[in-house]
Image (tube, rainbow, N blue to C red):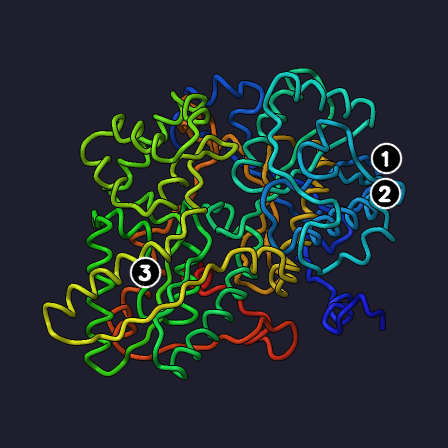
Amino acid sequence: MSRDVSSLQAARAGYVPHLPAVLRGDAQRVELGERTAPSSDAEAIAALFPQTIGQPMARLVPAEPTPATRPLRVGVVLSGGQAPGGHNVIAGLFDALKSLHPDSVLLGFLKGPAGVIKGQYVELTAEFIEPYRNTGGFNMIMSGRDKIETPDHLAACLANFQQLELDGLVIVGGDDSNTNAAVLAEYLRAEGSSTVVVGVPKTIDGDMKNEQIEASFGFDTACKVYSELIGNIARDATSAVKYWHFIRLMGRAASHVTLECALQTQPNVTLISEQVEADGETLAAVVERIANVVVERAKAGRHYGVLLVPEGIIEFMPDLQTLVRELQDILHKNEAYLRSIDTHTERFQFVINELSAGAAQSYAAMPRSVQEVLLTSDSHGNIPLSQVETERLLIDLVGDRIRLLEAEDGVDYKFSTIGHFLGYEGRCAAPTNFDASYCYALGYTAAVFVREQLTGYTVHVRNLLADHEEWQPGGTPVTMMLNMEQRKGKPTPVIRKTLVDLAGKPLAEFHAHEADWALNDRYTQPGPIQYFGPAEVSEQPTITLQLERG
């Protein structure tokens, strides 16, 4: 065996992803349903997407075999953050194109959308793709966070597609990337281009889902990776019996990852951003809630515990919502000036004078490291809240509160802490059996949509709790999923993120056990991701999916 390949990699190379029966058949056709419309802002979205608005839902059904079509020339690009299974999307796309016609060609654009704009690509052959099957990461063709949005970008893409004679471009990405796919599809159709654009739903955050898209790929694998680590940490907590572990998890806009990991590992405290917002909990109230659990466990002789917190929770607390909103506005209006100020003290003073009284008080109470993060913005014009070490912030504030309670009660509650951030550990793991097959089927479906010249769609595979044979591939018009949001100070069409449903079964299951898990040691150890063995171990989807669709 090559020293460059682990035993697991060698074994996984032979795994054959499952395909739905409709994709394994000799032929498929697209069955179109009723025309669709956005659930909100329909008039504004229709004005921006006159060429692609109102397209029907689509699903694949068996068809009578027909003579081979002409060869297809298709491009694929990986966009945004990595998610387990991206390579299997490309493998499924490639295999489907070759099954449609052996002379079909697949081109991989390099380093994300920038590669599409610049026309930088590599031809993906069977030999090129083979080592990447069932592997994690996006290193086959790499990824990037650029956006195809300016007139120059769009024109460059059109010229590249014409030169390469592309029948289609498949964009593998999350909500922003699939919105980008809709923008590009609209532009190409308006210009009379024959190149179609198809999106594939990817994000480990799990927030690109709806009635049609049951799960974004990568969520299954990432949650199982994190849950293994959390289970290990919980076992360590009951072994050392002296540390509280504060664990921050990915999920800026939604708490799906945190909720799923809680259901899998049963920690003592789990903060759900959406619940915090609904309950109107301030930062001080959250700190008080955590401190109460710490004290009650200490009184029972348990000077240890496990807490899970989503990275974006700050944006959901009403007092900090106001602060973030005001800071966002200040950054938008004074970005150049703030960059010109050399010292943090001067920036702090300027911002304090611009903020309202309540927001200024909240900002001043933050540690300097958090204050500095809150004065920066990412490529989308958003404050990068994922860079706020929320677990450290909570450790500091809960520690302060515990010391006050110790002084009041005359008791040493022995509050010792360790902070963790589980983020990149889950983005490039080898995909689970579920994600390996799910992604392969998504890629296969995308090829059929290109063949049928359907543009402005995000492909999906439904009925995911059933046997693989019964999975149902299809596609959702992107315009149906759009709404208008403020981005960089102006209304912009974007796919609506799906947050944790406060009335949903996953959250209800969590709340049913929350009080018990808080005071008792109910930790479970999911263990490492299983690729082999009994189906109840190796083939189980997430608890979230089972509760939502079961």
Q: Tag on residue 101? A: 2
Residue 209 on image: x %, y %: 48, 47
Residue named by callout 1: 70
Q: Is residue 296 above or below residue 146?
A: below
Element under disc 3: helix
**Residue closer to the observer: 196 or 424:** 424
Residue 27 on image: x %, y %: 75, 48
Badge 2: residue crowd in 10 Å (few <14, some 14–19, many ≥20): some
Residue 360 occupies which quadrant of the picture?
A: top left
Q: Amino acid at mark 3?
A: Ile
Q: Tag on residue 161? A: none
Q: Tag on residue 395? A: 3
Residue at 47%, 20% (x, y): give it: 46
Badge 1: residue crowd in 10 Å (few <14, some 14–19, many ≥20): few
Element under disc 1: loop
Q: Amino acid at mark 1?
A: Arg
